[in-house]
Image (cartoon, rainbow, N blue to C red):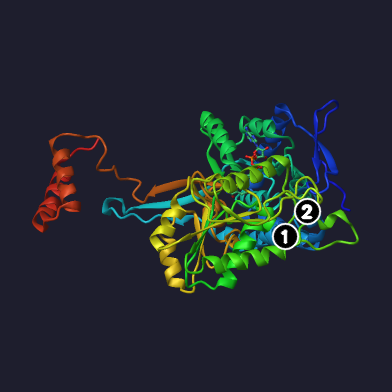
Amino acid sequence: MTTIPQPEVVSAGQAQFAVHNPATQEIIGTLPCMTASQIAVAVAEAARAQKRWAAVTVRDRLRILKRFGRILCDQKDTVAEVISREAGKPEAEALSTEILVVLDTVKYLSDYAPQFLLPERVPHGNPVMKLKRGTLLREPYGVVGIISPWNYPFSVPSVQTLAALAMGNAVVLKPSEFTPYSSLELRRLLVEAGLDGDLLQVITGDGAAGAALLNSGIHKIVFTGSVATGKRVAQAAAGRLLPVVLELGGKDPMIVLEDADLDVASSAAVWGAFMNAGQTCLSVERCYVHESIYEKFLEKCVAKTEKLRIGYSGAQPGAAVPHDVGPMIHQRQLQTVDGHVKDAIGRGARLLAGGTRLPELGPNFFAPTILADVDHSMTIMREETFGPALPVRSFKTEDEAVALANDSEFGLAASIFTGNRSRGEALARRIDAGTVMVNDVIACFGISEAPHGGVKASGIGRTHGRFGLEEMVWPKYVDSDSLPRMKKLWWYGYGPDFAQQMGGFVDLLFSGKLTKRVQGVLKSTQSYIRRRLI
Ligand code: NAD
């Protein structure tokens, strides 16, 4: 068992909250509900540290991140255990979908951040502006607030924190109250790698701590969580004109065309729907299969689902039983899944697998569930289920599949399975989603170069990749004129000559007629000579 890291701020008489293992209900530890004034102090400390950090070269900042990467690699099993214990996911998944993603981010930042932060030339098209030099600089915001969910308690906050730090920001991170220890691990490892501890403050507490962070002196907020909370965050941020990134929920469709490899597509659907007990923003939440392969596809999905091992290996230390699907995070989440499944069955869906709680394993376990013949009147096809459920229906034509996929308030990601890559890519263009994968699911989250984020109710802005880095900086445009001793011709000194000069100039630049353009040169030159600039 690993030692549990603790945040530094604990005052006598302070309210505390307990963190439970969702599989066993065991209390992992107790942490303080940090108050608004403690959060304000943490933000002020971070702001002071950021001034020093912004003066450090990007290469020196990256040296610390690379050391962090090496330490994380060495301590991967310890970190996986912390993640698994508080989120309930198999340790193998903690390695593949959390630690691997973070290590790849370190590599991506090391390779790409220096060139990203180089001053960028902005060429001028307008001939009058040719004697000016335009340069785009990217400045860190200062203190970036990060509010995180529980489903990827290590990778979601780490990727965002590392990007913010690499760009020269400090971070104040408010992890989910259900999974705070993974963020404390992140801070422990970064400090071990040489990061000034003040640069990454971890705020513990529930939604009230998140709300207090929004009201503190942060300069940007990156929020990942539900649509309902995202709206509250956006409202609070609007009051302060605080720039926001919102990474919200999804209802990701998977389309299986008739030329798809059925074995591959059914494995993808089962993994995409049940991985992390279906508690992934990029989970396969709806599946549309061509009518010619519908029944065969369902048969394969059911056979593969029956082979899944459900449980929690950490419950028996030393005699770990490998498992594929763990518990859900808490009862509220489980009730949502149960409600969606019951609603679908009540409206005529065919239950092919699961459909029930598994109390013999623990209160938070729900059997991986496959429902066929669903339709869009059912809650399970409209609202985010966020649990181990795979609702499937058939379609006749590509147009129908696209219409069904786009019939959603969400637009995070989608996937298309086909034997014809060009056909898949063409169809991808018609889907309203931040990411469309052809012949894979979810894996885009592990591609550090790929922007992550959605359209419609799935959010605003991006994390990951170049677009994610752009969110951690503000653009500063510097323009310098190469003729310091020359007054500019658009300055004061208005009158008939100015009007003639500008009229001629507009013709010169934009008239469709050659004669007018030539006349424009003459008019603007003559009037410029006559003009007296003030
Ligand atoms: P949630 O919205 O309940 O909580 C997210 C975070 O917000 C927590 O840290 C919580 O304490 C905090 N919070 C709650 N109320 C707040 C308030 N008023 N002000 C500020 N912060 C507040 O979400 P959750 O249940 O932790 O996570 C599940 C959701 O996250 C799902 O909808 C899932 O799709 C989404 N998610 C999205 C992505 C993505 O990248 N798009 C990734 C992971 C999870």
Residue 353 - label: none
Q: Position of residue 437 (x, y in %)?
A: 52, 63
Mark closest to the chain's N terminus, 1 or 2: 2
Between the residue at mark 1 and the residue at mark 2, the CA separation in whole angstroms equals 8 Å
Q: Which residue is mark 1?
A: 93
Residue drawn at x 56%, y 71% as measured from the top left: 262
Q: Is residue 164 left or right of residue 180?
A: left
Q: Label 2 amino acid?
A: Ser
Contact (CB < 8 A) between labels 1 and 2? yes
Q: Which residue is mark 2?
A: 84
Decide which of 11, 122 is in the foreground and name it.
11
Decide which of 531, 363 is in the foreground and name it.
363
Q: Position of residue 17 (x, y in %)?
A: 79, 34
- Is the residue 124 above or below the residue 43 in the image? below
Residue labelled 2 has its Cβ within 8 Å of some atom of ligand 1: no
Asked which secondary structure carries label 2, the reply is helix
- Residue 432 makes an appearance in the image: no
